[in-house]
Amino acid sequence: MGSCHKKSTRSGGGDALIPAEPIAALLADIAPIGSPRTPPPPVAAVRDAVPKGPIPRRQLLLLSLYTVVIWSLGNGLLPLLPKFATGLGASDVDIGYFLALSYGAIALGSASAGWLSGRLGRIRVQMVVMALVVSPLFLLTSQVTAFWQLLAVSVVLWWFGGVSLTLATIVAGLSAGPRERGTVLGILALTAPLGSILGGLGIGYLADSLGFSAMWIVVGLIWLLCPAAGLFIRDVAPGARDATIPGRRGSGLWRMAFLVLLASAVLGAFGSFIGGFGRSLVMRSGFTNEDITSTVAVSGLATLPFPLLLGYLSDRFGRLRFLGLCYLVGVVGLLVYSAAGQLVEFWMGSAFVAFVAYVSTGVGSALVTDIVDRPSLSRGLALFNTTGWIGGILGFAIGGILFAYLGYADGFRVGAALLVAAFLLLVPIARSIGARRPALS
């Protein structure tokens, strides 16, 4: 892409307005995708692809813009989906299964991103194409008149959304140098609470002011910022081996630590989503759309500085202690939910539970880059990203049943118990990797 000459499109008699280099480079990238005639890079070139310096600021800014749009729309829409589905005739159990299937699509998309990035390469092209497909699907959602139609469109829409979000995380992980992974992935994780603020303040207002049909159209137009940002992102090589941590290649010790980390993350997300789902169900009666989405905005404001702060601290003092701290704060939030009845109490619970959803993911992703070999890093990050969506599937599918049979208070307490279990699973991880590399723990 360095060989591309800069071109521009002129309008009238003015100066160059639209740089054509990103579009030309993107078109040049499309042809070789998956081509059997493309020879593999030499070993020396693959090793040289390991980032040795800090990630360029422009790259990090574009990745942040790409992901903040996804998080803003996703986090803003999620608390309104039960209300929207109720208007189409869905019951509480129906809504639970609907959200579980939607998150299943996100999980499958997230897992697919690891395979697609390694198999096809040209991650930047995939980011642009996948994001372009989503916008028309939002417009199609504005026309649904039955619950089954919403279900069908949502499954397809969120699969593409899951792929798009995870590809951005993969690019960030592969672009970051070994001494800045916690900071870089913490900055990217910062887009989740920032998106909660923007989406929480904006989406509810759109729904109340314009109605749901017009809201979906506006959301589809806003989504176009994702492929626009993707045009300017610098591509990365997914196959280079990172030799900065000797002795971890092929070790069963590291494989076991990674698998236990995945189990812990699934349990943490499971408990977190029970909380978010229950909150949306409780608040359907007696609260406006803006009230409901304001809980998301407050959770984003409360956690905003922490992904970057804990990512920075984890680079210096170890990852697991901060990961465990996030789970314990989430336990407090779920216990607050179990007794909540006023808006301010739901704000407090949302702020605490958000440490699981927004803060722990950055530290966890950095831990994955530490314990997984670089040739497997795309799949490793994709699998770790998938744990959140798997937790969502379980939280929505089982949460609907829990709340129906146990009531909301006891359902929230079950979620708190799941977070305690996630915390306890960090203990064997610390034991297995602590002797090899104490900085991780």
Image (cartoon, rainbow, N blue to C red):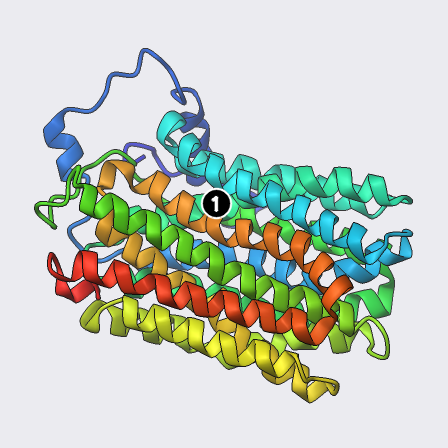
Kind of residue sitting beneath label 1: Gly
- Which residue is denoted by mark 1 in the rendering? 230
Q: Nearer the viewer, residue 182 or 323?
A: 323
Which residue is at a point 46% across and 34% down the rendered structure image?
125
Residue 101: x, y in percent? 67, 44
Q: Nearer the viewer, residue 20 or 29?
A: 29
> Does residue 33 appear to the left or right of 271 in the view shown?
left
Residue 1: x, y in percent? 32, 34
> Does residue 287 appear to the left or right of 171 in the view shown?
right
Which residue is at a point 61% across and 41% down the rendered structure image?
105
Q: Is residue 31 above or below residue 256?
A: above
Quarter that holds the C terminus = bottom left
Residue 208: which quarter of the image? bottom right
Q: Nearer the viewer, residue 317 or 410?
A: 410
Q: Can the viewer see residue 65 in this picture? A: no
Q: Nearer the viewer, residue 208 or 226?
A: 208
